[in-house]
Image (cartoon, rainbow, N blue to C red):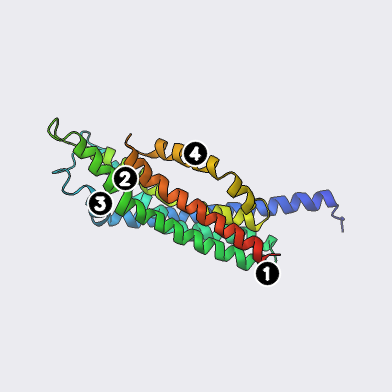
Amino acid sequence: MTPIYPEERKKLDVIGHLEELRKRILICLAALVIAGAFSFWKGGFLMSLVRRPVNGLVDELIFISPTEAFVAYIKVALLTGFIVSFPLVLYNFWGFIAPALDRRKRYRMLIWLGFALALFLAGILFSYFVAIPAALNFLLNFSEGIAVAKITLGKYISFFGALVLVGGITFEIPIIIGVLADIGLLRASVLRRKRHYAILAILVFAAVITPTQDILNMLIFALPMIILYEIGIVIATLIEKYSR
């Protein structure tokens, strides 16, 4: 039998990890395709949900190219498919890193991923019920008496999808802070000391992603992120206190 040298064993381990990663990525992509296909089948119902924030603000959405409505349906289907398959993405992420963790860390990581899913969904709901209506109200009422709002379906879907994803991602701030604190890469004292820099960065980020230039709509995005940052500090403090 040919002996396996340490270098060969490391190479086999890397190949094995890459193969495992490839399989899990394929599983996630397959889930996204299946969820997206089902969402496309239910496109009429989903489109009515997507239209709800703009109902009453414009009489109707229009399209100006033959493919625009079809592409809009695909965008809504992919957005819905991503949201529906997101729990499976988190599960496969946990399944990939779990073998490298001991039993205690594996359990804690599973809890973190559960909170990540809950906050992702909370961010989507925040965008849908608060951020998007507020932005639309400002934008569409701004030109009242000057011009009549005629929004294309494609532009509205892009606007809607971007804000939904931004809401889901920004609500992960406490989880990112908590995980970094849990593995020892971040301390609560540093977060407190750098709070003013963090708030400035949040305000700049909110100004970039806000579809309007007014302070009110910027604060609609910035205030939740600042609160989530403060929650992250509390989480980091608790982790340091109980991990001693």
Q: Are marks 1 and 2 in contact (CB under 8 Å)?
A: no
Residue at the disc numbered 4: 200
Amino acid at circle 4: Leu
Nearest to N terminus: mark 1 or mark 4: 1
Of the two numbered discs 3 and 2 in the rendering, the one whose residue sits closer to the viewer: 2
Residue at the disc numbered 3: 47
Q: Are marks 3 and 2 in contact (CB under 8 Å)?
A: no
Amino acid at circle 1: Arg
SS at badge 4 = helix
The residue carrying pointer 1 sits among few (fewer than 14), some (14 to 19) or many (20 or more) residues within 10 Å by Cα, namely few
Residue at the disc numbered 1: 103
Q: CA distance from mark 1 to mark 2?
A: 41 Å
Nearest to N terminus: mark 3 or mark 2: 3
SS at badge 1 = helix
SS at badge 3 = helix
Q: Position of residue 53 (x, y in %)?
A: 24, 50
Residue 69, visible in the rendered structure: no
**Label tally:** 4
Would you identify the image quadrant in which residue 178 lies?
bottom right
Q: Quadrant location of the N terminus?
A: bottom right
Amino acid at circle 2: Phe
Q: Position of residue 183 (x, y in %)?
A: 67, 56
Q: CA distance from mark 1 to mark 3?
A: 44 Å
The residue carrying pointer 3 sits among few (fewer than 14), some (14 to 19) or many (20 or more) residues within 10 Å by Cα, namely some
Residue at the disc numbered 2: 160
Of residue 161 and residue 17, the one placed in the foreground of this image is 161
Of the two numbered discs 1 and 4 in the rendering, the one whose residue sits closer to the viewer: 4
Nearest to N terminus: mark 1 or mark 3: 3
